[in-house]
Structures are given as structure tokens and as C-alpha cells.
Image (cartoon, rainbow, N blue to C red):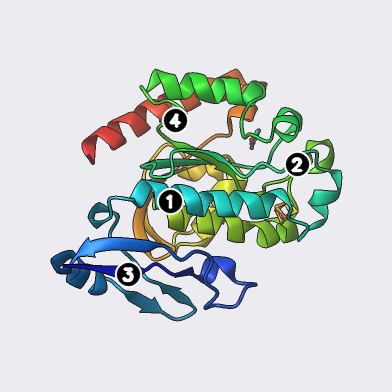
Amino acid sequence: MYGFFEKLVACEACRELSPLQIIDTSRVFLDSWNQQKAQARVSVAVGFIRTEIDRSLCQEGFALSKKELDIVASEVSVCTKCPLWKSREKAVPGVGNPEARTMFIGEAPGRSEDVKGEPFVGAAGKLLDTLLSQIGLSREQVFITNVVKCRPPANRQPKPVEIETCTPYLNRQILIIQPEFIVTLGSHSTAYIFSKTTLPFSSITQVRGKPHKATILGVPRTVFPTFHPASALYNQEHEKILEQDFQLLKTELRNTH
Ligand code: URA
Ligand code: SF4
């Protein structure tokens, strides 16, 4: 016996959309036992309604996540919600594995990223690739994105209102990928992710280099803040610290598997 289950995704992440807007409807075939189990997982919270199908029950989990991420990326690519769209060449939604266990969040695209439409492809990106390979990770295994998806002019810092306007996209990416670990690169992404928790954020120097367990967008996760790789380009001390932090992250990833 097979039944089908409608997968609805609508959540706090789309706060400017109607709370019940269905951004994707997919039929997932489940045997009746699994269907009962899946139904038991339907979760409803205030302003947040998501029919949650345990991805382990769903053979098509990877394809569904990919499809949902593609929807976010296509919205980002034509987004005009904040003024940053005016000066961008290409928006930079993010790249990587739709079912990544670990998500890396930077600040905002720079010049090279704006040209290519991909995050961390300039000098800071080269360093990020090295740091990842030093702990045995590839870009294909993780998901890499930024707090703000379009390049701020002259690489200035993103403004609070731009972060506020853009982060519903990041929230949706987190809800789709469901990463166990969120590695925040630099103070902007750390401050934003901490603002989604009850953890106090003092400064990146205070909180970096250690795992912080917290509930983010309704799910318990581990936040692991470290410096932004760009800061290591002009500060050798930061490069050493980044290498050490990535080794700690490797241990953490291994210990919790
Ligand atoms: N710096 C960031 O924060 N993100 C990028 O994608 C590139 C540089
Ligand atoms: Fe839209 Fe974000 Fe780009 Fe602003 S930065 S235009 S909110 S995608």
C-alpha cells in the first residue's frame, strides 16, 4: 500500500510572505507504516508551519532539498528587496551539498564572487578551500553561503537593514539543508546566527574556536564561530588561529558522528 504526502514549506523564514504560502509541493511515496510515522512528525508552531518528513524516510530527500534550494537561488538571482541589487553583477545564493552536515556562512560577496555568482572564489575563498582540505572536507560535502547575497559597493560592510532584508533567504537555506553544524565566518554572520538563539554575542574574539549548542530555527544545532578568512589575508595571527579553529572543528565533527 502506498499513499502520498504533500510537502509544504512555509515558515518564519519567509516572514514577508504569507505564513501559509506553499513554496514547493512534492509528492513523496511512502509505505503505510512510514506514512503513519511521517504524519506523526507534522509540526506546527506559531508563525511557522512546516510539514516535516524525516529525510531518512524519504528516498528522494536529496532531490527535494536540491529543488528547494534551486527555488531559493532563482528568487535571489532576481531579488530587488534591498538597494544592493542595483550595483550587483550577479547575486550569490550559495553552493554545495543540499544535505550538508556542515554549513559555512560568510559576510557578503566581494568582487570575484559578484562576477562569478559563487561564494568564496576570490583570495579569501582560496584560503577557505585550503582550510577545508586541511580537515579533509571538500566544497562538495559542505554548503557555503553568506548572510547577504549581493555585493555591497566597494566591499563595505552590509548595513543592518540589508541583513534584515536578506536573511529570510539564509533562514530558508538552513531549514532546507538542516545542517547539524553552522560555522560562522566573522562577526557579521556570528552575530546574526547568535541573534537566532538565546546565546549572548559579545565579540567574535570571545566566542570563536568553540562549539556552542543552541536551538536555531526550531532545531538543536552546533554553532562554531571563527574568524573570517579575509581577515587572515592581512593578519598572520588570524591565519594561525583559523587553522587551529578548523582543527578543533574537525575533532568536533568526528566526536559527534
Ligand atoms: N567574503 C565573504 O564573506 N563571502 C564571500 O563569498 C567572499 C568573501
Ligand atoms: Fe535581495 Fe539580498 Fe540582494 Fe538585497 S542583498 S537585493 S535582499 S538578494
Q: Nearer the viewer, mark 1 or mark 4?
A: 1
C-alpha distance separating marks 2 and 1: 26 Å
Question: Is the residue 16 above or below the residue 221 in the image?
Answer: below
The amino acid beneath tag 1 is Ser
First in residue order: circle 2 vs circle 1? 1
Q: Secondary structure at mark 2?
A: loop
For disc 2, the marked residue is 151
Q: Secondary structure at mark 3?
A: strand
C-alpha distance separating marks 3 and 4: 30 Å
> Where's residue 151, x and y in %?
75, 41
First in residue order: circle 2 vs circle 3? 3
- Give the side of residue 115 with respect to residue 59, left or right: right
Q: Are marks 2 and 3 in contact (CB under 8 Å)?
A: no
For disc 1, the marked residue is 65
For disc 4, the marked residue is 140
Q: Nearer the viewer, mark 1 or mark 3?
A: 3
C-alpha distance separating marks 2 and 3: 39 Å
Question: Is the residue 26 above or below the residue 124 in the image?
Answer: below
